[in-house]
Amino acid sequence: MSLLDVERQVIAACEELPIHPCTHYLLLLRYLKWWYRKTQVEKKTPFIDMFNCVPLRQIYGCPLGGIGGGTITRGWRGQFCRWQLNPGMYQHQTVIADQDSSLPVGVFVWDVENEGDEAMDVSIMFSMRNGLGGEDDAPGGLWNEPFCLEQDGKTVQGLLLHHPTLPNPYTMAVAARLTADTTVTHITAFDPDSTGQQVWQDLLQDGQLDSPAGQSTPSQKGEGVAGAVCVSGKLPPRGQCRLEFSLAWDMPRIMFGAKGQVHYRRYTRFFGLDGDAAPALSHYALCRYADWEDRISAWQSPVLDDRSLPAWYKSALFNELYFLADGGTVWLEVPEDSLPEELGGNMCWLRPVLRDYGRFGYLEGQEYRMYNTYDVHFYASFALVMLWPKLELSLQYDMALATLREDLTRRRYLMSGVMAPVKRKNVIPHDIGDPDDEPWLRVNAYLIHDTADWKDLNLKFVLQVYRDYYLTGDQGFLKDMWPVCLAVMESEMKFDKDHDGLIENGGYADQTYDGWVTTGPSAYCGGLWLAAVAVMVQMALLCGAQEVQDKFSSILSRGQEAYERLLWNGRYYNYDSSSQPQSRSIMSDQCAGQWFLRACGLGEGDTEVFPTPHVVRALQTIFELNVQAFAGGAMGAVNGMQPHGVPDRSSVQSDEVWVGVVYGLAATMIQEGLTWEGFQTAEGCYRTVWERLGLAFQTPEAYCQQRVFRSLAYMRPLSIWAMQLALQQQQHKKASRPIVEQSTGPRTGPKCGPKEALANLNPE
């Protein structure tokens, strides 16, 4: 693509924008120059590529692989079609080993039953290409070899597919369980670009493969190589047998795109660093998967067996967890000597947490390639803290370290065109870095805005710290985070320019809605501010800091008065305080501060920040207009709605539905007793994404009423676990009373609340 071609695309995109074209025209021109330099000069992949979006393919199933070790996603036909072996970098292509997709290569455990009166022989073959058939394969040198591993009286056999291409070499293993009733055979190498006739003829002769000994000849430059494993069994009349395959990949040592540092994946703690663990991984998986199934069933059964919960909710709750594995996720070991003493010295539990639990990173989205994007993690973090709480604490320690650092390298920001530092001290970074660079070492890959002046990031850190303390009871963590919370709140104070106890937005898109301009006191950032101030009061009390407690108590009192006076209009909180018509828009996310307060056990009674009648009335207004008056009430809640029932189209984001925001809104409704409304709201998102749009296991950040979507496979929808927390907390308070009785919704609606507390949902 030439520079002229790209410029034409920019102009075309600009003409489609529903808002003032000048600002975005300049943004797109700056983006064009940056994109061209990145792709054509530096030969790198942009962290957001507007010109090469991932195409919609309604084919994806559940990804294979655990957390942080890379993933391979299957399609509904059984093909392998989405690969994330190199950390954070995705390849969307189907890899076929014989150009015959009739082979059942996508099912790994087969229970075969013979309903006839004659004995039968059955054979199943698993073929696999070594590599993905792209640039990584082109240099050649790929080779395969058979293996057999017997341990504890159990044997697995199969093929190792060695892929030594730097910088991240790996070995894949296709293996089958060998038992007294099965036979495992193989073909070491064949041409994956041929018809596969040699493999089929071999298999059809006797139901087995020839099983040559020794390794294959390394592939030549530009050539591909594949292999196949076959497991066979005898079926007596009216009998049955089980045939078991595994696919494992061993990439223990990784380098990110900058190729500056070597990292080791978490599993190497248990399987070694040398890159020879594929046989052991195969053996372990084939011998343990039944136990994994039992433990997963025990973990999920309290939800799945609860008849008062709708089926769609159960599906969404567990299936949205795909992103914790398939979000470009890395889970890394942290060497002792990699942590700077001068920054982490005051955090007593920093080193033990990172040493024992490692370092965790997941992308904002498969198309928005930034690790641990913090304004979005604010929503998604409920899944992590409820299920893998130590990984959440590890992420928080990393964020605290990054907050105390600075990078004064100046760069041009695409929206404003202003030159400013990459990272300022004592402000929360937007993200921890780009996998195509060197994350954790160089943060803030995002360069659309200078997020040092964003109003929400610091507040979201304070709120998450207290939420994490409240749910884990980890006092050491709270003590370590307290000085960082003080530092970021001190940085935030400058945004209260009139000293009325309430911060003001800066007249641009200075928060997670980075395309939606906010001016002056606003419902979203103002609410987050008051919630964070209230949390600081509680933390000061716990840390014995009386002067700090008094200071923030005074700010809270003044800020509450200003917030109600400036923003409450009798039905909801205004979007912001500008003179523009959209300032009276109804924002679906206006109660985000209250959402987090209630998740922390605050926000009512003696710790009330927002008047409860106002919160409930605002939520009812959102349900009436943003939900029911939008798309017939069947698509969730639109971000912004004008008071007369027309979506706010003042920005590119105000008329979108953000799936993760909707799940957070639903949780807030449940917290305030509007359980029926909460489930109705969330159901619209699920039905739209998983059924109408066919976006299973690739839930987008956003979609519009016209069924246009943005950013496939996104982090924020993990916030559905906030709904689960809200249900558990209500059940804890209401004991055996059905939550649905607290709803103001129609009594003819579905019973949405659980009848008993859901405990022990942590899969660990």
Image (tube, grey):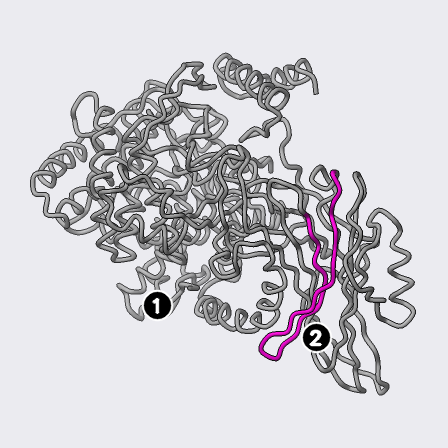
Magenta highlight on residue 148: yes
- Which callout, 1 or 2, points to the residue nearer the camera? 2
- Give left or right: position of 90 versus 412: right
Identity of the residue drawn at 34% across and 56% down: 726
Instruction: Tell me the kind of residue under disc 1.
Output: Ala
Mark 1 element type: loop
- Report the predominant secondary structure element of the magenta stretch: strand
Identity of the residue drawn at 22% across and 54% down: 475
User: Can the viewer see residue 353 in this picture?
Assistant: yes
Residue that label 2 marks: 178
Image position, residue 450 (x, y; %): 39, 23
Instruction: Tell me the kind of residue under disc 2.
Output: Leu
Magenta highlight on residue 109: no
Identity of the residue drawn at 54% across and 47% down: 253
Residue that label 1 marks: 757
Work out whether 198 lies above or below 411. Answer: below
Residue range highlighted in magenta = 139-163
Pick the residue in front: 603 or 420: 420
- Give left or right: position of 517 versus 37: left
Work out whether 743 lies above or below 416. Answer: below
Mark 2 element type: strand
State the quadrant of the N terminus. top right
